[in-house]
């Protein structure tokens, strides 16, 4: 690997890992602009190196759907995001500041929305969650998950957010065969 | 002949493998055209080997159809039973179980929240170049000049009243005395609430003014939230002060009550 290519890999790693202000990930056209035309090859090499650390790069659309790495035209508008290759251990999740109740609320919300064919009225979701959790906690968490991108709110209706599509294996969560 | 059959079998087997790995939708395979091709080749078959290959091809196609069946079964289960089971699981599971299940299905985004030396330098540079707030504010403020304001504008914004306050107060007092003369007590909220919020606040202000002057007295039912306006008390001693908050909720409630 040439020195130039190596520096491109380093640059790509910094771009992908450094936290964005609003939206996570870096767009294909941005990588092309700062790394060069061979940015996809650079990302493939970086992906191999990240693999050793238990990380992987995902190319996703604006709505969070995973994209094919072979289509250069689509990739320009794709977001490249680094995710953990395997689910994190429970202890690490707690250390990262997630509370069990918060995760349980997110899990139950996603299960409810998926069971309603991908969208559900916010009031119905709240009523469902309030069977187990206090109302203030439910409202607070739903707002937080919308802000984080796990959920999307359109008027009174909640949808699965882009971040859920990127991070969560919904089939596994629902206990369905993959 | 043999080579054509072998090629066809290879093609079918490859499609079968792809369908098994879900690389292709099993229904993308045109089974009918493959069968047609096999049936065209069948009359030309002569040797045992050729028949054997033909059977192998048919067997592969049968496996492909089986794959299609399994695909339909799993998809239908996914569509019908999956969501229902998920809902049931969410209801039955404890918080810990839900959280664990979520973590097992979770591959969170990895990101670095770190300030680099370069960004620190940029920030320092920005800070040094930043003009003081006072100076920026002065620059951003529009120049103030003297001008004329329409009387209607002042009236609409509530800065001036058409009627002098005393006269308005007298009107409220007169209206109140009439009502008190009829029933001896008047419900505070019913009296002050009007369709215009500004008018409501003004009437509440007038009541406060009249109570302070000793022209009326107020009574709050300690067991409920009713407040009554009563004729002035004869006693010389000053009464206790009372704070009444006029919230939109209360006003809406009173309006609804009045309508019903």
Image (tube, coloured by chain):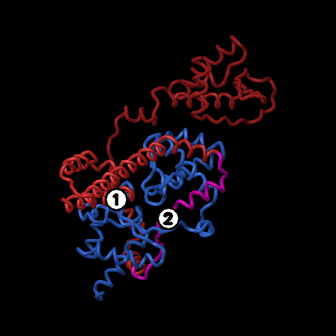
How many residues crowd around disc 1 within 10 Å: few (fewer than 14), some, or many (20 or more)? Answer: some
Indicate the chain on which mark 1 is placed: B
Where is residue B49? Give x, y as percent: 27, 60
At 57% from the left edge and 18% from the top edge, which residue is drawn?
B259
Q: Nearer the viewer, residue B200 or B230?
A: B200
Q: Earlier in the sequence, mark 2 or mark 1?
A: 1
Q: Secondary structure at mark 1?
A: helix
Image quadrant of residue B240? Answer: top right
Q: Is residue B247 magenta?
A: no
* Residue on which the image places disc 2: B108
Q: Is B229 situated above or below B19?
A: above
Q: Which residues are magenta?
A: B92-118
The residue located at (32%, 41%) in the rendering is B148
Query: Is A70 in front, or is B172?
Result: A70
Which element is circle 2 on?
Answer: loop
CB under 8 Å between discs 2 and 1: no
Which chain does the blue colour mark? A
The label shown at residue B18 is 1
Chain identifier matching the red colour in the rendered picture: B
Of all chains, the one bearing label 2 is: B
Dividing the picture into quarters, in which one does residue B168 lie?
Answer: top right
């Amino acid at each position: 690997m040439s020195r130039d290519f190596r520096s491109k890999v380093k640059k790509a790693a910094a771009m992908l890992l450094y936290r964005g202000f609003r939206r996570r990930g870096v767009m294909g056209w941005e990588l092309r602009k700062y790394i060069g035309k061979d940015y996809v090859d650079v990302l493939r090499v970086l992906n191999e190196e990240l693999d050793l650390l238990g990380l992987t790069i995902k190319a996703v659309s604006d709505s969070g759907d995973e994209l094919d790495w072979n289509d250069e035209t689509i990739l320009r508008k794709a977001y490249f995001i680094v995710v953990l290759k395997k689910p994190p251990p429970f202890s690490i999740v707690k250390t990262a500041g997630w509370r069990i109740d918060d995760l349980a609320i997110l899990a139950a919300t996603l299960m409810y929305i998926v069971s309603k064919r991908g969208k559900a009225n916010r009031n119905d979701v709240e009523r469902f969650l309030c069977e187990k959790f206090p109302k203030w906690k439910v409202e607070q968490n739903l707002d937080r998950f919308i802000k984080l991108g796990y959920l999307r709110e359109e008027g009174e209706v909640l949808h699965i957010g882009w971040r859920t599509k990127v991070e969560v294996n919904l089939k596994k969560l629902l206990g369905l065969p993959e | 002949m043999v080579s054509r059959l072998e090629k066809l079998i290879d093609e079918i087997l490859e499609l079968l493998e792809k369908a098994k790995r879900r690389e292709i939708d099993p229904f993308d395979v045109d089974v009918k055209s493959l069968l047609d091709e096999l049936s065209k080749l069948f009359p030309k078959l002569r040797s045992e080997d050729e028949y054997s290959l033909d059977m192998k091809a048919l067997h592969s196609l049968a496996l492909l159809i089986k794959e299609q069946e399994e695909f339909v079964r799993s998809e239908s289960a996914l569509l019908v039973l999956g969501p229902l089971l998920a809902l049931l699981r969410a209801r039955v599971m404890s918080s810990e179980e839900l959280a664990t299940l979520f973590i097992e299905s979770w591959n969170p985004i990895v990101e670095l929240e770190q300030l680099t030396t370069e960004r620190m330098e940029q920030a320092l540079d920005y800070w040094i170049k930043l003009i003081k707030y006072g100076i920026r504010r002065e620059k951003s403020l529009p120049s103030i000049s003297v001008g004329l304001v329409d009387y209607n504008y002042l009236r609409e914004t509530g800065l001036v009243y058409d009627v002098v306050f005393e006269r308005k107060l007298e009107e409220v007092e007169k209206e109140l005395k009439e009502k008190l003369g009829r029933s001896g007590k008047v419900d505070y909220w019913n009296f002050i609430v009007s369709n215009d919020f500004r008018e409501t606040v003004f009437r509440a202000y007038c009541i406060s003014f009249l109570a302070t002057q000793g022209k009326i007295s107020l009574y709050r039912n300690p067991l409920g939230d009713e407040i009554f306006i009563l004729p002035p008390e004869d006693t010389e001693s000053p009464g206790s002060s009372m704070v009444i908050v006029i919230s939109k909720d209360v006003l809406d409630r009173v309006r609804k009550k009045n309508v019903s």
